[in-house]
Amino acid sequence: MGHDGVRYPRLRGVSTSDHIGGDGNGKQNGPQNGPQNGPQNGPQTGHLNGDPIGGPPGPLGRVVATERRPNTPHEFHFWTALDASVGIGTIVRVVGAYPVGGQLPVIYGVVVEGFSYTDLQSPLHDVLGHDGSPARGAYAGTDRTEIRLYTAAVLRQVPEEPLQPVPMGEVFLADDADVACALRMDAYLREGTNTGIPVGVYHAGGTDAAIFVDADFLLGPEAAHVTVTGVSGLATKTSAVEWLLASIFTHFPASKGSVAAVCFNVKGPDLCFLDQPAVELSDADRALYDKLQVPPLPFPHVHYYAPYTANGVALNTLRTHEALASNTHPLVWGLQDVMEFADVLLTREDIDAKADALIDFIRESVVGHRFVDDRLPRPYEVQSFSELNAWFADVLRMMEQTNSESWRTHHIATIRKIRNRLTNIAQRCAGLVTNDGVSRDLPWGDFADRTVYVIDVANLEEDAQDLIFARVVSTLRKKLEQRDLGVDHVIVFVDELNKYAPSDGPDTYVRKMLLDVAERGRYLGLVLFGAQQFRSQVHRRVIGNAGTQLFGRMDGDELATPGYAVLSPAVKTKLATLEKGQLMVRHPHFTQPVFVRFPRPAVLSGREGADRFPRSAEPPLEVAVARSLRALDPSVTLEWVKQVTGLYEPHEILRAKSQTELARPGDVRGFFKAQFRAVVPARTVTPRVTVPPAVHSAPEDDPYG
């Protein structure tokens, strides 16, 4: 009750402006007139809800410490009004009341935990105060005193020495400049030496601040690699990587060199339409693009690579629509391309020291070399799997004819086993590995700046996927070492790291290769971007070497693993409820993780692209050849192709097509026809007419007639 007998709503909730916020009339009249005149007079010369009119925002809270909850150099507590714009992840600034070394200390922190409680000693007291009925709360004489208490982890102290516990002081909501200082972004956002790459927008209260990560710690050499973790379908892991690539291509400083990306599409149509614009972007997404100064456009330079299907007629990809054919290329390797990586396809049970020695001998002395042996019938220049099979046949035939159990220290049983394993590769990886040795590969040495190269392996068997991973990444590393790739930095995006770099299981060639990239790739400019659903199940050396870590919506079971013990319960709860488009970012410059929102990628999503560009049915061989040749010479017709290829086997036709696409000659028709063996047409033979000898009749008087 008021002194005049009138019940006021929330009598204890008197505005701070009536007592401490203002001066002049607001300070004088507030205590006298209570809530009636305080809000009227306070705004004229003082504060409303603690904020000065026309000036900078006032404090939203005060630092508090007790013996049970003391402040430390890394953590502090503060209380706020009930309606303060503070939540988990909010960045705040504390201004100390007393100078240290002649300077008022300023402390930046991020809220990691929140509490709310009243002056009740026991919940039973509240039951008794309401006569046991929740509906009687409206008849209470006064509202119970309630406090909002928050715990914040220290992001930065200014000055940084001496490092002391956080002092008592006023707490303010961080503005854009405060956010940059708190996250130490001011160190790499200087004019002239700006290496910031926008990753998203931090939003709290009235603050919308762009968050930047340091390019030197994102793509090397100081640190490198990115991992994205979250539940499938809700964490937008692929979208986060697409957005980050667009941001890097826009903001990566030219003084740092050129950059390209190699992406492995391992499931469905996720990365199949990066060159197509999004169906629609919301106004909120466009506002984020404007804020982060990234154009909302698809990637202008994208090239797709995919092996053929097993019969070699069509590409084994979802990008088979004719409208997408211009930048979709075949990926085909011959014997010399895969011989170095034969170990990827051979199990440890197949390969022992003797088998290893034979494979090394074939790799170093036979394949791609002129090989001569006095006991063999002829010299050999093995270039393809079919020629390797013929070489094996001659070696085994010679050993059987001479009754030899070994040849050049290699036992006949080992030779037979390795022949079976190696010559089987073309069948196991049909469509990717060819028997005839004609290769179609990535443009090694001619990689272009700000270009994305997508390799579609979604429809391949596991053996073929492993072979592609191993050879592509190993070749990238070799070319970067030799400075012969065409660009200075390459981002390799691999989804499903749980599968390719698991924390347990056999030590496969692919896992060893990914570990090597994670540990030494940053010195070469080879950067790994990985996505996984379960971070705890990825090899710890891959996770530990990732300088930047992004987290989308997380599963509760995953958050319960030891790897997330450093996060407070409130931060874990927020991670488990993040919306699409929200991320928690950890970066070497950030003392604590920060929550950001990023815009939807400006590219066509996999599902929308599959609807707009449905997969074409596999065409007949002649139609597929005509389409391929027509891209080189528009005058090529289907009738002409049928006329030229009518007498040849399918493998001969496919080989001629591959040779023509690889050579890209000026005279397409003449070059294509020249790839076929000469066929002598059958001659029509006129049958000889044989006149039978004349038959003489017997004389009439012949007694034997």
Image (cartoon, helix red, strand yellow):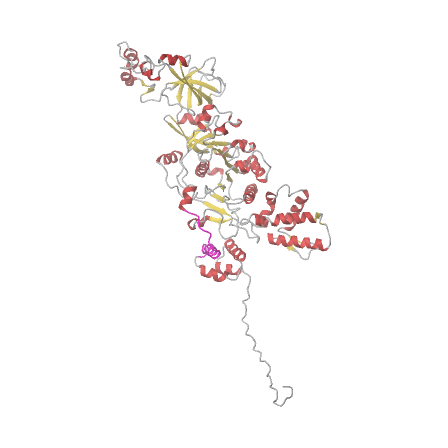
Q: Which image quarter is the C terminus in?
A: bottom right
Q: Is residue 46 left or right of residue 664?
A: left
Left or right: residue 151 versus residue 370 is: left
Asked if residue 205 shows in the view, the reply is: yes
Instruction: Please state the horizontal and vertical placement of residue 327, each as a whole percent of the image.
Output: 45, 48
Q: Can see residue 381?
A: no
Residue 82 x/y as whole percent: 37, 19
Q: Is residue 699 above or below residue 682?
A: below
Image quadrant in which the N terminus is located:
top left
Residue 215: image location, x then y, percent: 48, 34
User: Quick one: which residue is furthest to the bottom in this view?
Assistant: 701
Residue 691 x %, y %: 58, 80
Frontmost residue, 437 versus 192: 437
Extreme residue in the top direction = 3
- 118 in relation to 373, above or below: above
Would you say 85 lies left or right of 490 here? left
Q: Is residue 84 magenta?
A: no
User: Does 393 appear above or below 341?
Assistant: below
Q: Which of these two is toward me, 572 or 336?
A: 572
Span of residues in magenta: 613-633
Q: Residue placed at 71% from the left, 53% from the top? A: 399
**Along the line of sight, the residue nearer the viewer: 289 or 184:** 289
State how many labels appear. Answer: 0
Magenta segment: does it hold 617?
Answer: yes
Seen from the viewer's position, the closer of residues 416 and 296 is 416
